[in-house]
């Protein structure tokens, strides 16, 4: 299983997951169709599935066009069936979604939106976290409570430490400014910031991140309790 990072819109990431034995692919959160089509054309890839982490436009904007063009099946959380365009397959929390050679566990992780999910490809130790967990940050709480977001992040924190994190946006550098402002003695974070700047300077994405690094550097994952997490989330909203 190969993951191809496709930049969309201003700072979104869509991901193409390709099973190289069959050339069957899934796209995660196609913000728009054009960059996905550009990549797929001439590559003999069969875009069979569109997987959505949540209903926001910058994550589902390409659904309609891609489904029309490739006859893809749209997969998303059951309670978002009226807000994910063209949804076909309704998922439940803790369900294993298994098709062809793809196998992912579904985590319902509300907070950013009420129907937000993550796709955990557990055999490959890769998780697609949408706008819930970012590298060095977490999503804004739009529809949920602090408690929900705190609990959602906790579920991700419990995964194996070498899990690769694929999130919905390239926010890592901005996020790092907030982390270092509130955690100025964190040496591991300082080291990570140097790596981040190097990658960005070379035009490379800062994604994927490794869970072990996030546990040490991401201030939202380091928050010990709900109260300190909530305080940080408020501070970040006005940072
Ligand atoms: Zn969002
Ligand atoms: Fe987003």
Image (cartoon, rainbow, N blue to C red):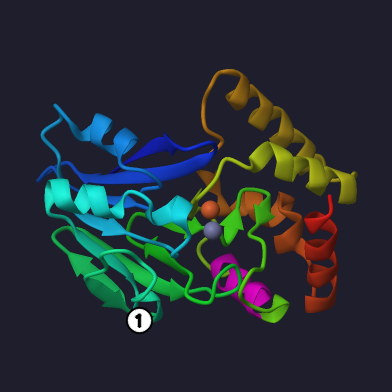
Instruction: Identify whether 122 is placed above or below 143.
Output: above
* Left or right: residue 8 compared with residue 187: left
Instruction: Identify whether 48 is placed above or below 189.
Output: below
How many residues crowd mark 1 within 10 Å: few (<14), some (14–19), many (20+)? some
Task: Return the residue at label 1.
Answer: 92
Q: Is mark 1 within 8 Å of ligand 1?
A: no
Q: Residue at x 71, y 53 (%)?
A: 218
User: Residue reaching furthest top?
Assistant: 202
* Magenta stretch bounds: 148-157
Q: Quadrant of residue 206?
A: top right
Q: Nearer the viewer, residue 8 or 205?
A: 8
Q: Is residue 77 visible?
A: yes
How many numbered tags mark residues here? 1
Q: Residue at x 27, y 56 (%)?
A: 50
Q: Nearer the viewer, residue 182 or 10?
A: 10
* Left or right: residue 91 compared with residue 158: left
Q: Picture coordinates of residue 93 (x, y %)?
A: 40, 81
- Please tell me whether mark 1 sits on a helix, a strand or a loop: loop
């Amino acid at each position: 299983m190969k993951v191809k990072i496709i930049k969309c819109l201003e700072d979104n990431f869509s991901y193409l997951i390709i099973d190289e034995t069959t050339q069957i692919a899934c796209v995660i959160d196609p913000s728009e169709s054009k960059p996905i089509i550009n990549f797929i054309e001439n590559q003999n890839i069969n875009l069979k599935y569109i997987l959505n982490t949540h209903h926001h436009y910058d994550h589902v904007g390409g659904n309609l066009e891609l489904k029309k063009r490739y006859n893809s099946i749209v997969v998303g959380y059951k309670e978002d069936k009226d807000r994910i365009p063209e949804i076909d397959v309704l998922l439940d929390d803790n369900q294993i979604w298994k098709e062809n050679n793809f196998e992912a566990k579904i985590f319902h992780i509300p907070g950013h939106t009420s129907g937000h999910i993550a796709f955990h490809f557990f055999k490959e130790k890769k998780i697609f976290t949408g706008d819930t967990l970012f590298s060095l940050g977490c999503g804004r709480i739009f529809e949920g409570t602090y408690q929900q977001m705190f609990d959602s992040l906790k579920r991700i924190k419990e995964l194996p430490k070498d899990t690769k994190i694929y999130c919905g946006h390239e926010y890592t550098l901005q996020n790092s400014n907030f982390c270092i402002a509130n955690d100025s003695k964190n040496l591991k974070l300082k080291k990570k910031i140097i790596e981040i700047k190097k990658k960005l300077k070379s035009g490379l994405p800062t994604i994927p991140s490794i869970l072990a690094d996030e546990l040490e550097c991401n201030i939202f994952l380091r928050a010990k309790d709900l109260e300190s997490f909530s305080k940080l989330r408020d501070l970040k909203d006005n940072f």
